[in-house]
Image (tube, coloured by chain):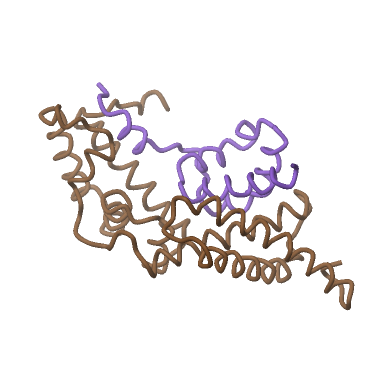
Amino acid sequence: MLAGTGPRREAALARLHERLLRIARREAARRGPRLAISGPELDDVAHQAAADALLAITAKISQFRGESRFITWAYKFVIFEVSAKIGRHFWRHPVVPLGPEEWDRLPARFGFDPAHEAEWRDLLAAMRRAVDTELTPRQREVFVAIVLNDVPLDTLVLSLASSRNAIYKMLFDARRKLRAALAAYGYLPDDSSRRS
Amino acid sequence: MNGWPALDRFLRTDPRDVGCAEAMQMLHVYAELAAAGEAVSQRYPGIAAHLQACGPCGEDFEGLLAALRSDAQ
């Protein structure tokens, strides 16, 4: 019906928009407690997400292959739109400004007990060395932003004009390299033999 | 020796991880099966590995699952 024309198509679009808006509102509210946005601003995110999702669905309807119910496929678009709009919001209003490397945050992030600093001080120094020597400049930039400075991945995607897939892959490769280095230094178990 | 389990978990990568693009391409199929109670992580281990490691994609999956469950109520 959505692929057709005339009043029946308009009615189908209106019904779909209504469902998308309901899901967008739920999703914005679900993410709300962890965000610094609420009330009309959150509702605005939901309205924009539903409208943009409807546009994306009608543009891509020929790509729907029936692997799931149509409504599940359609809901995916509105979830992505809510996610993207919230990422954009944080890009414009950063909670944590991009700044110098915050190595001091690392012990708390990974649950290192301050009472046992003598035990993890060397590990931290080894990790810092590995970040400097093992990672490419781009991997280092991504690692520092996400892990040390707590920048949300989707926000970094926007500030580097990249894609979620590319940033994730960079972080994935950085994690793999750092783990291998820390295992080689004897700080983490070497399980390369277990996987081969 | 492993006195730093949180750091080890974070740095450990799963070679089956399919990445964001493939996981997002299949998210509607994966979520619908998950909502129906299927053993979806066994059927799509690469997507399961990715959703566990990638915060934003995991969040999108949780959102889609919540949407499907709200429809079922």
x and y percent of residue A64 in the render?
A: 75, 59
What residue lies at 33% left-to-right and 52% top-to-bottom?
A146
Q: In this view, does A143 lie to the left or right of B21?
A: left
Q: In this view, does A87 lie above or below A178?
A: below
Q: In this view, does A155 lie to the left or right of A38?
A: left
What residue lies at 21% left-to-right and 27% top-to-bottom?
A186
Q: Which chain is assigned brown? A: A
Return the residue found at the far bottom. A6
The colour applied to the residues of chain B in this rendering is purple
Among the 4 quarters of the image, the one containing residue A63: bottom right
Asked whether residue A196 is in view, the answer is no
What residue lies at 51% left-to-right and 42% top-to-bottom?
B50
x and y percent of residue A150 in the render?
A: 31, 52
Return the residue found at the far top. B1
Among the 4 quarters of the image, the one containing residue A62: bottom right
Residue B32 or B15: which is nearer the viewer?
B32
Question: How many discs mark residues in the rendered view?
Answer: 0
Q: In this view, does A8 lie above or below A32?
A: below
Q: In this view, does A118 lie above or below A146?
A: above
Where is the N terminus of chain B found, in terms of image quarters?
top left
x and y percent of residue A121 in the render?
A: 13, 35
Where is the C terminus of chain B found, in terms of image quarters?
top right
Q: In this view, does B30 lie to the left or right of A196?
A: right
Return the residue found at the far front. A39
Q: In this view, does A38 lie above or below A193?
A: below
Asked whether residue A66 is in view, the answer is yes
What residue lies at 26% left-to-right and 50% top-to-bottom?
A148
